[in-house]
Image (cartoon, rainbow, N blue to C red):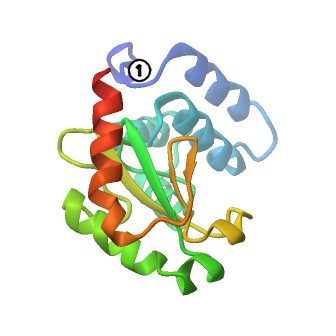
């Protein structure tokens, strides 16, 4: 493989792929390889998938199918602030759908998308185990409890302000 075709993946990831290719049933390690790439880069770009296809001799269509089938894989970079709205039963009953709609409106993006400035990503989750605090929103690792749709603009402004400080 030429140095030019390796420009998107680091040597550690390529070494991991090489090690997988030496094992019995090497193509069965595709998900492990994709996990490794996402862990390193935060998402799977088309260039990453193309390089895996070439290196592991797996059709790009298979890699694309695997990466879009499993919810864990992200095909776009996350924003600096990853917002996740819990849509578990308790949160949903307490208005998480309205909170989600407020985030969609304020940010101008849908679930799984990132704002054009790269600041915010919007995701959903299922039950964080703090049902008494419903509805719950996490921004990166911070939990916000009993969030209402009316609080969303203020919450976003406080996160932006903290980013500037």
**Crowdedness near tag 1: few (<14), some (14–19) or many (≥20) residues, C-alpha within 10 Å:** some
Q: Position of residue 139 (x, y in %)?
A: 48, 47
Quarter occupied by the N terminus: top left
Drawn side of residue 74 relative to residue 127, left or right: left
Residue 110 visible in the current orientation: no
Work out whether 52 lies above or below 75: above
The quarter of the displayed image where residue 44 is located: top left
Q: Position of residue 73 (x, y in %)?
A: 52, 53
Could you tell me which residue is drawn at 27 percent across and 24 percent down?
Answer: 164
Could you tell me which residue is drawn at 44 percent across and 37 percent down?
Answer: 54
What residue would you read off at disc 1?
6
Quarter occupied by the C terminus: top left
Q: Position of residue 15 (x, y in %)?
A: 63, 19
- Towards the viewer: 76 or 144: 144
- Towards the viewer: 36 or 161: 161
Drawn side of residue 100 relative to residue 25, left or right: left
Work out whether 28 lies above or below 3: below
């Amino acid at each position: 493989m030429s140095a030019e075709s390796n420009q998107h993946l680091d040597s550690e990831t390529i070494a991991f792929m090489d090690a997988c290719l030496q094992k019995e049933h090497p193509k069965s390690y595709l998900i492990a390889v994709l996990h490794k790439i996402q862990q390193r880069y935060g998402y799977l770009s088309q260039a990453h998938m193309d390089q895996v296809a070439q290196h592991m001799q797996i059709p790009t269509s298979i890699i694309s199918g695997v990466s879009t089938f499993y919810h864990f894989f992200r095909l776009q970079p996350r924003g600096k602030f990853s917002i996740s709205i819990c849509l578990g039963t308790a949160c949903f009953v307490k208005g998480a759908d309205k909170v989600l709609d407020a985030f969609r409106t304020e940010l101008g993006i849908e679930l799984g998308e990132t704002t054009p400035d790269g600041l915010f990503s919007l995701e959903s989750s299922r039950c964080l185990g703090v049902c008494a605090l419903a509805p719950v929103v996490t921004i990166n690792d911070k939990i916000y409890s009993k969030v209402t749709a009316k609080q969303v603009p203020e919450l976003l402004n406080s996160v932006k302000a903290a980013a500037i400080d």
